[in-house]
Amino acid sequence: MAFLDVTNATKKFGGFIAINDVSFSVEKGARHAIIGPNGAGKTTLFNLISGLILPTTGSIALEGQRLSRMKPHEIVRIGMARSFQKVNVFPRKTAFENVQVALIANRKLQFNPFHAAAGLFGDEIMQLLEQVRLGGDSGRRAGELAHGKQKQLELAVALAAEPKILLLDEPTAGMSIAETLSSIALIRDIVQQRGITLLFTEHDMNVVFEIASTISVLHHGEIIATGLPHEVRANDDVQRIYLGRE
Amino acid sequence: MFANPMILFIQVMNSLSLAMNLFIIAAGLTLIFGVLRIVNFAHGAFYMVGAYVALSILRVTGDSNLGFLLGVLGAGALMGAMAFVVERGLLSRLYDKEHMLQLLFTFALVLVIKDLVKMIWGSGQYSIGAPPFLRGAVNLGISPYPKYALFLCVMGPIIAVAIWFFMERTRWGRILRAAREDRVMLNALGTDVKLVYSGVFVTGAALAAMGGALAAPRSAVDPGMDSLVIIDAFIIVIIGGLGSLLGSFVGALILGFLTVMGSIYLKEWVIVASYVMMVVILLVRPWGLFGKADEERH
Amino acid sequence: QDGPIKVGVILPMSGGGAYVGEGIYAGVDLAVKQVNEAGGVLGRPLQVLLRDEQLRPDVSTAAMRELITLEGVQHFIGPATSATSLANSQIAREEKVVNISPSAKTEALTAGDNLHDYIFQLAPTTDVDGVRTVEVLRGMGTESICFTGFDYAYTHDWFAAIRANMGDITEAGEFLVPMNATDFSATITQLLSSDCDTIVGTQYGGSFIAFVKQATPFGLFESKKVLWGSNTGDHAVAAALGAELPGGLWASAADVWYYEGEDSHAAYQQALAAHQGRKETDMWPITGYNAVKFLTAAIEAAGTTEPTAVAAALDGLTIQTPLGEITIDPETNRANSPEFYGRFEPQEGSDVARMTDLRLVR
Amino acid sequence: MTMCSASTWEGNEMSLLQVEAINVCYGLSKVLHDVSLKIETGELVALVGRNGVGKSTTMRAIMGITPPASGKILWKGQPITRRPSHLNARAGLGYVPEERRIFGSLTVWENLDVARLPPREGLEPWTEDRVFALFPDLERFRNRPGGLLSGGQQQMLTIARTLMGNPELILLDEPSEGVAPLIVAQIGEKIRELRDAGVSIIMAEQNLDFVLNLSDRCYVLEKGVVVYHGTAAELRDNKDVQNRYLHI
Amino acid sequence: MTSRPQLIFLACLFLALLAVPFLGSRYLTELAVQVMIFSLLALSLNILVGHIGLVSFGHAAFFAIGGYATAFFLTRWQLPLAAAMPMAVLLAAAFALVIGVLCVRLKAIYFAMLTLAFSMLVWGIIIKWKPVTGGDDGFVGITLPGMLASPQSFYWFVLAVVGASTALMWLLSKSTMGQIFVAIRENETRASFLGVNVRQMQLIGFVLAALFAAIAGSLMAMYLRGMYPQSAFWTQSGHIVISVLLGGVHSFVGPILGASLLYLLEVTIHQYTQYWPLVMGLILLLVVLVLPEGLIELFRKLYARLGRK
Ligand SMILES: Nc1ncnc2c1ncn2[C@@H]1O[C@H](COP(=O)(O)OP(=O)(O)OP(=O)(O)O)[C@@H](O)[C@H]1O
Ligand SMILES: Nc1ncnc2c1ncn2[C@@H]1O[C@H](COP(=O)(O)OP(=O)(O)OP(=O)(O)O)[C@@H](O)[C@H]1O
Ligand SMILES: [Mg+2]
Ligand SMILES: [Mg+2]
């Protein structure tokens, strides 16, 4: 039993098979990348794992515990956090509050109607924002941040949930080169320091090869290759259908 | 009652004509609701204005078939023109503001319109007769049945098909559906969204007014007529599913049958029947019968 | 204390009930004008403060309290309906102010616990109506009745009163619809297939009009005799329906402008016609008119505006009204107001039907 | 490093699009400061810069979605400042937003259909077939609601949709975001083809290789100000500017 | 809007209300009672609308249940106020729990309409259950405890209850729970992926809102000496929504401003013209067009100006 086990997962949308009998596992502490062409099913796979949608057949387990019938918030409770491909923040809340909400939920303070929220967890939040280079934007509304900065915020929010396993869907898409580089460093460092297991997708191969310890390639809803980064890079099929001339 | 097929037949006809009467009223609401996402409280007021305008036109033309036709069309035209002024002058300023402000706006509109109607036409009751060729009853073989009710049974589907065709089979309809989702983007793609919005609001208002004129021969024209229909219209639109025309049609049928059959079997308790039905439908289908879940992908 | 005597008038002035409020108010206004032109009461003019009750007890009580606390009003006319009158009567009791209800017909207003020294009911109650109605029904040759109407207090009370008095007349069924119903076709079909010769109904105002328009093409009025309550004899109803009003409909009204029985009535109608700018007036003004006349007579009699004294003066007070003498029973605080009963028939030279065989029932 | 002010660019000849010293505010905060740029017919101009420097805002201002508070925008010499965006679209501007803004409940085909505008003289008109030839993936999903497409598929649909308006100038905001490498390369080629067909393009992009390979000229923005401008080749060689405004 | 100016405003308001009975006008005292009750009602709805982002069109149901239950317990069962009022409020909360479980599964307008349907069911039952509710005539004649019989003492009672409720809601709005509520309004999906059980939190909010609405209803029944079916009708719910919108949903004090203005307008325009709907409609139109964020915007501008001086 690995840390995360996906066993024969299939997801059909109507007649369309988005995920086709996919099985793979991620070891504890691994940094596993899922790559593949657009529409391969990466986001769908993440949605299955994180409980947003239910698999048609198959099962998913975290540390042996079946996730398949759990609600997203229950899955989060047992230690999974995720970011989204399309930015998904609290638009009218400030960047500071966005992270704060994550911490409140994480510390189960949502049931307390008398615990004042103002400034709560201030240092912790600012530290996280600094790490994603949003220190200067902490007081701005998330919805008013530029697209790339919202992606950075997305990352901070996911990290604030203090997960055992982190799912990042194209974490650096839309980020500038500078931010991408620092995000790579941040993700790698935090994941290593805290012993977080990482599962991520990304189309920027620099990011993938910088971070990933193992890679799976998804194509038409099926895993066509899994291995160490250099193995996958050398795989002919991957070259042909995904990387193109490189 | 089932022992007597003739009575059953009449009650079924009663249900149908009520349903179509309700559908005609709700059609404009569906349209405005569906595209502009505005909960138009003023729909009932538009409906009432339509009936009053038709009344005034009929006073001029005298009681005739042509007069009735002019009354219905005139109600639609006049209400449409007023809606245009209101939309362009006031409502259009609110589209990119806080969404629920539009609710407040239509609420204010109800107050203003109702009082203006009272100032113009007074607080008394009036009546519009059915046009001469639709008076009395016609023999349906099994039993005689009021002509005007039959007329509504025909008008309902005609209006439904016309709107359906427009929405689902024309490019205009596609544009309306796109406008519902992202106004700014559609505008940037070359559609004059302001015009589209005006058009929808005007059409919806005109439909409401014509509904008022068409319903008048079965009801009174008085200052309370709006509040009697508005809630039924909302029930229909909601159980059918937001913005779904087919849904509204089916919703109207359900409410029509429920009201008629309910008043036979449930007697006065029919008062809660429509709400129980609404609760049940929404619990089983949270987006209404024909509504689509606002699914979002991330 | 000088200055005008303030009279609080609380009536429905907006929405579906506005026609009632405006009608009653016209009568109030006329009477107040007459009183003031004649030098006022105790040498002081009357001043009317009008508020809209919106047919809502919470609104009507709030208006009453506002008038009491802000304006110092001690005499009230209104509200128009049973529910609002009941609610306001509680305030009248608590605040010890005179409250004359011109039009509410509910028994409850002046029965049992609800009766107190400050509330006076001018309109005949449903019990009185019941007795009078059965009398009319007998005259119509009714043998069996179907009841229909809105499911609310007035309907239940009136029907109960009819049942209590109808003796050998049989009941063939009761078909109620909820308040606010707009479609009566199901009921109409049931009535048609029922085994009765007479229909007694209570839909009022716009709903009565709707009922008639939906029932006529079914031939309901040709196959049954019909008697309607809820002041359907009001000329406004006939005027609204015009030629669509079914001939032969029996109804009652507090007043009809074409009644020619008494000189006092003719004078009143003349004044009202001048006041409203039309000859064919509605029935509601008489109720407001009489209310003001009772109030002023009582103040005169008491020699003071002090509410307790005025209330005491109203007990057993008899005044001359356009419809003859009316007395308030000191025990029940109810007036013995008469009402017209008649049968609508089309009029030559007019679109608007009038009640014939008109009887002023006391 | 060259600082470019508006005056530098006031030539005699009329450019396709000229942006002259525009200032854009969101509420009280000003995010563009006297931004000037221009593009000639058939050119491919890139806007580069870090996150939040105002690239998208510049495009929205040109398109008329977020009108500038001051400054001028000229389209073929005619002022179009603060003109409603549907008129700009009809005049030949096409906008591909970074957030994609697909009409989720409309099918792929319907998304294309609502964006259809009359053909433009001198340009081969775009049809569904031509668009599908460009993005074969879309044809497969022609009847699928746009909202159900994958992120990258939506990106293609956004571009395709804009093409249906037969634009002469396309404002292309981060076209390579979320797109697989193979497709990025393909999109690059398509962009080049478009330009060769006479369509002008203003592109905002984070992928520097992509930018430098494709564009004729580049504007570098920093905090709402144009801080550098030059040809792609010049920028490629200018490590100073790259380090200062694009890298860490 | 930041907390400080709002707190200052609330404090000033409270001080002003403390002074009202000493002005010697019974009218003002009673008017203030009504304004306070309607403000409380609007505030309670804003827990749903402003915080959680659910617009209920059936909020009046809980107002009515609170009112009718208080009336019933006080008058029919002759319970002391200290028992009648809490029982009425708990009863409403229990109703809210049942209705809420079913309603919070729905989104946006469907939620609005389902709550409307439930409230109309409550209305229908009130109309038909004559022995308990008085039917369409309403529950007339409540026996008030002697110590509340005078307008003065009733005023102090209402001020205390409304003040305490407002303080509680203020704390709630500034608490971690309030922060999560707002997060749910902003983005349900994101909130659930932070480990928040969205349905559960919405239900908590729904019940809390109903609870405070029931307190308002209870006070209103005592003030009116009766309770009437119109209080459960959908127009009453609409009225509450309108007050909240008029004031502005994204602040704590907005609903207070909205409810107060709406009620004061209704009462005062009545006194001058029978065309009050027209005047009121025009004023509302003006507010909507000039202050699209609600009255709170005016407040904000005033504060900004004062701050600058
Ligand atoms: N709800 C749905 N209904 C129908 N089809 C869907 C649905 N969700 C996704 N799909 C389809 O499933 C396929 C996989 O989509 P998915 O979003 O998982 O791709 P992806 O690998 O994340 O792609 P990208 O790299 O472009 O983000 C796509 O073809 C998409 O159109
Ligand atoms: N709706 C808005 N309200 C307020 N400020 C905004 C809004 N949209 C953008 N901004 C601000 O304007 C500035 C420029 O944003 P813009 O989106 O143009 O940047 P960008 O260069 O496109 O960044 P990215 O590469 O991340 O997309 C940013 O500081 C951003 O926070
Ligand atoms: Mg994806
Ligand atoms: Mg951008």
Image (cartoon, coloured by chain):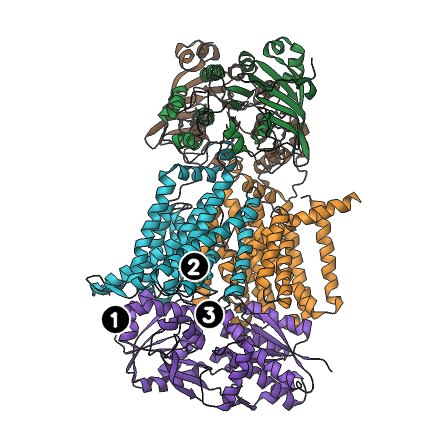
Chain colours: A brown, B cyan, C purple, D green, E orange
From the image, tell me which residue sits under label 2. Answer: B229
Residue C99 in picture, x, y percent from top left: 58, 80
Disc 1 marks which residue?
Answer: C193
The residue at label 3 has a CB less than 8 Å from ligand 1 = no
The foreground one among C313 and B75 is B75
Between the residue at mark 2 and the residue at mark 1, the CA separation in whole angstroms equals 28 Å
- Give the Cα separation between the discs numbered 2 and 3: 23 Å
Residue B100 visible to the viewer: no
As shown in the figure, which amino acid type bears the numbered disc 3? Gly
Amino acid type, mark 1: Ser
The location of residue A78, given as percent across then percent down, is: 50, 33
Q: Nearer the viewer, residue C20 or A186?
A: C20
Contact check, label 2 and label 1, Cβ < 8 Å: no
* Residue at the outermost left position: B141
> Mark number for residue E135?
3
Q: Chain of mark 2?
A: B
Q: Nearer the viewer, mark 2 or mark 3?
A: 2
Quadrant in the picture for the N terminus of chain E: top right
Q: Residues within 10 Å of mark 3 (few under 14, many from 20)?
A: many
